[in-house]
Image (spheres, helix red, strand yellow):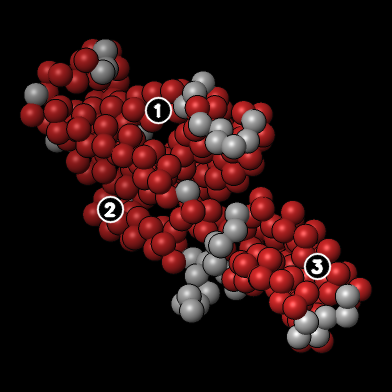
Amino acid sequence: MSIRQERFEADHGELWEALERWLGGYPTLGDEDIPGAYRRLCHHVALSRERQYTPALHDRLQALALGLHQRLYAEGEGGFGAWRYLARDFPQLVRREWRLVLMASILLFGSWIAAFLVVRRRPELVHLVLSPAQAAKYAQMYDPATQETFGMRGPMQDVAMFGYYIWNNIGIDFQVFASGLVLGIGSVFTLLYNGIQGGAVMGHLTNLGFVSTFYGFVSGHSSFELLGAALSGAAGLRLGLAWVHPGRHSRLEALKDAGRVGAKLVMGAALMTFVAAAIEGFWSANTLVPWKVKLGVGLVLWALLLAYFGLAGRRRTAP
C-alpha cells in the first residue's frame, strides 16, 4: 500500500464508515446529508480507479456506492419508499430529534397534567380556561344521560365524522409546525394552550363523574393524536431554533435544513393523525364496546406506539 493511499484512507475513512453504518440502519448521518456524501463517495471511487489503489479498497468503495445508489433511487420509488419511511426513517428521525421531541412533549403533557390536577383540586378554576357555556357544552356532550355523542350512529355519519377529524386535526398539526417560524414562540404557545385546555376539560369531566363516556371515547385515539401533536410541535421548534441559532450556516440555509427535517416529522405526525381520525370515527364512539375494553385497547396502543419509536429501525446492535 502506497503512502498516497494511506493518506487517502485517513482523510476519507471516517466518511466511508459513517455511510456503511447508515446503510446498516444506524443514524450516523442525517438523511439530508446522504445525497452530498454519496456524491463525494462517487468522486472517491473515480479517484481510486484513476490512481490504481489496491483492489480491496476499490471494491469496498464500489460496493458502498452501489448500496447507496440502490437505497437512494431504487428503494425510494413507489410504495416501498413509503414503507421504508414508516418502518425505519420516521422512527430514526424521531430518535435523532429526541431533545426537541422531549421539549415539545413536556410542554404539551406537562401543561395537560398540571391543568388536570388543578381543576381536580379546585373545580371552579375550570372557568379560567373554559367559559361557562363551553363547560356546559362539554358536560352535555359526555353526559351518559343525553347520549348526544354516544348514541347510535349510522355508517354515513361515521364516515362524515372521520372526514371532519382528518380536516381539523391534520390542519392543527401543520399550524403548529408553521407557527414555529415565529422564533418557535408560536409552537410553544400552541402546545401549552392545547395542553392546558385538554387537561382542564379532562379534570372538569372527571369531577362530574363522566368517566365511562369521556375516557371510553378518548382512550383509543389519544396516543396517535397527542403524540402526533407533540411531533408537530417538535418540528415547529426545529424551525424556531434555526432562526435563533443558525450556527455556522446563514439563517436562510439553516431554515432550509430545518424545514426539510421538520417536514419529514410533520408528515409522520399527519399520518399518525390520520390513524387517530380513523379510530375516532369508527371505534371511539361505538357504544357496543364496553368502555373498559376501549381503555385497555388505548393503553395497548400507547405501549405499541412508544415501542415503535424506541425500537423500529434498529436492525442490529452497534459494533
Q: Quadrant of residue 22?
A: bottom right
Q: Tell me the quarter of the image containing the N terminus.
A: bottom right
Q: Which residue sits furthest right? A: 50
Foreground mark, 2 or 3?
A: 3
Q: Is residue 215 above or below residue 139?
A: below
For badge 1, the amino acid type reads: Val
- What's the CA distance linking mark 2 and mark 3? 56 Å
Q: Position of residue 102 (x, y in %)?
A: 36, 45
Structural crowding at the residue carrying mark 1, measured as other residues with C-alpha within 10 Å and reported as few (<14), some (14–19) or many (≥20):
many
Q: Which residue sits furthest top? A: 132
For badge 3, the amino acid type reads: His
Q: Is residue 84 above or below residue 189?
A: below
Q: Quadrant of residue 138?
A: top left
- Which residue in the protein does label 2 denote? 295
- Which residue in the protein does label 1 denote? 188
Q: Is residue 314 above or below residue 115?
A: below
Are dots 3 and 1 in contact, CB under 8 Å?
Answer: no
At 88% from the left and 80% from the top, the residue drawn is 52
Left or right? Give the position of 48 relative to 21. Answer: right
Of residues 187 and 304, which is closer to you in this image?
187
- What's the CA distance linking mark 2 and mark 1? 30 Å
Instruction: Answer with mark 2 or mark 1, whichever residue precedes in sequence.
Output: 1
At 44% from the left and 58% from the top, the residue drawn is 309
Q: Position of residue 128 (x, y in %)?
A: 21, 15
In this view of the protein, can residue 252 be seen by the observer?
A: yes
